[in-house]
Amino acid sequence: MFVNHKRILIEFGDCDPAEIVFFANYFRWFDDCTTALFAAAGLSIRKLFPSYGIVGIPIVEASARFLSPSTYGDELEVESSVTEWRKSSFVITHKFFREGDLMLEGRETRVWAAAHPTESNRLKALPLPKEVIEKLSKNGKARGPKAISRSVRSGR
Amino acid sequence: MFVNHKRILIEFGDCDPAEIVFFANYFRWFDDCTTALFAAAGLSIRKLFPSYGIVGIPIVEASARFLSPSTYGDELEVESSVTEWRKSSFVITHKFFREGDLMLEGRETRVWAAAHPTESNRLKALPLPKEVIEKLSKNGKARGPKAISRSVRSGR
Amino acid sequence: MFVNHKRILIEFGDCDPAEIVFFANYFRWFDDCTTALFAAAGLSIRKLFPSYGIVGIPIVEASARFLSPSTYGDELEVESSVTEWRKSSFVITHKFFREGDLMLEGRETRVWAAAHPTESNRLKALPLPKEVIEKLSKNGKARGPKAISRSVRSGR
Amino acid sequence: MFVNHKRILIEFGDCDPAEIVFFANYFRWFDDCTTALFAAAGLSIRKLFPSYGIVGIPIVEASARFLSPSTYGDELEVESSVTEWRKSSFVITHKFFREGDLMLEGRETRVWAAAHPTESNRLKALPLPKEVIEKLSKNGKARGPKAISRSVRSGR
């Protein structure tokens, strides 16, 4: 399994009057972490989509379990990986840690989607390319030390 | 079941480069719709929390199934209600419609939470007051015609 | 001068740990209010841009003076109008009121912009169409009673 | 002048249907950069406010000039410093660079504010502590190499 780690610094503006992260922001970070996971695997979303003839990897399901709140000044480390491959969709799991403690866990189900051939405003799910699955499975390369996020290969 | 309806106009800034709503915004609207549901039941969150001695109704789980995308200029109608009561937590379901079509469905599990008596930075779940359950069940009063959101009592 | 009024309900998630609106959200609302101003003048941004051959009305300058803070549950009324016309740009002024009191004042300078004819990733400012200026000056029509925002013609 | 540099990676969700950063996000980053500037000077906002008896450093004016747009995948480097000291307020200037090119420039005017002694819901501006001015002027210490943002002393 190819795992990427991304560090997130919680900012004042991410928090609400309860002085904890406003929960919708975690879903924003799920997206950022998925982008980082793809980038770490050599799949930049900016170049990826046109080069594979897709319009994106839209989300069809998302969920999160919030175990402990975080506040501004906290630094979280997010561990992201594809945990399930289906024919034309896949599940990404994100685990947020603060100093080693699991704070929350989230899942996104995304589709490999092209424009619909005959109907505008609709999408058509395509089979996932073998190369993409491989890069996000065990063949991915870790990014160098200058990277904002870092990735590791893991046997888990 | 006490049901509230809230109208949401999708703005340009709510959408991403795929020209559809950036999905994290739906979770922001879940929170807005829960506030509106409580307000429609006569439970203003601004006054509610101090008057019941709680610090809030933090989310412990959230999920959404995205059926169809929306874009800026679209007006959505959200139907919100408490669909499950537990001892000190409850589940709110939000259904987003566009011109009668269900676009997405979401669920939040929230806790009735006070400050922890001995440990700061922790919360303590309290039993839900009977009055709150009643107001959000069948005794809630619909808001007047000037309200931004409107509520209806429903037998569903 | 064509003036539009839009009502904004401040939500919990719009506020920060100081229990007031996180200031960046006001700029988000500036954009929403500009969209509403254009819509009230019969210029839907969703249809406007393609029909005039422009890619948008990007912002080149924005500013705000914050006089008094607002918090969740507050309802603000925003008064928006074009207060200056230049050759290919214009200034929109937004005034936010709470129960008649001016809470903040903001300005956006926007450009009427098409894709650059020879360089991708660049824009080219075009002269503002006379019709657009007229609609946003005195010829604009107020929207009907079902509108979320309402507009009035004003001699100010 | 004490200058801090903070790196910002533009994410997909930061961008709008025009495929550029939705401008309100820059104001969010102004706040993040001010936090980083203070932290780099040894003034953590989380500890600072209680220890100086203030409730925060609310913004009374903000402005930005947008010179060039950025999109997702871009990395910006923000240069932040206090460029003007007044009795109880100060001006912070943020310059956003992409590969050496200035993309935008922003200014925030903030107040050193305590709770009002007699009126709740109001703030009272206090004179800026000499120590805070000194730390944010020339006596600030650069943060170590592990820091997410880095700061340098500058004679400019």
Image (cartoon, coloured by chain):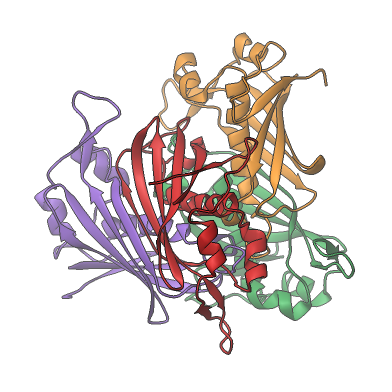
Chain colours: A red, B purple, C green, D orange
Using the image as rendered, state which of residue B14 and residue C89 is in the foreground. B14
Name the spot of residue D27 as percent of width and height, x first: 63, 43
Horizontal relation, residue C130 to residue D116: left or right: right
State the residue lying farthest toward the bottom. A118
Q: Where on the picture, by quarter, is residue D4?
A: top right
Q: Count the marks.
A: 0
Residue in view at x 53 percent, y 68 percent: A130
Name the spot of residue B83 as percent of width and height, x first: 20, 64
Q: Where on the picture, by quarter, is residue D138?
A: top right
Name the spot of residue B19 as percent of width and height, x first: 59, 69
Residue in view at x 40 percent, y 42 percent: A96
Residue in view at x 58 percent, y 45 percent: C24
Using the image as rendered, state which of residue D35 and residue C66 is in the foreground. D35
Using the image as rendered, state which of residue B34 and residue A89 is in the foreground. A89
Name the spot of residue D84 as percent of width and height, x first: 73, 23
Residue in view at x 68 percent, y 64 percent: D18
Compared to residue B92, the image places residue D25 above or below, namely: above
Compared to residue C144, the image places residue C74 above or below, namely: above
Q: Where on the picture, by quarter, is residue B153?
A: bottom left
Q: Is any part of residue D2 visible from this angle?
A: no
Using the image as rendered, state which of residue D48 and residue C6 is in the foreground. D48
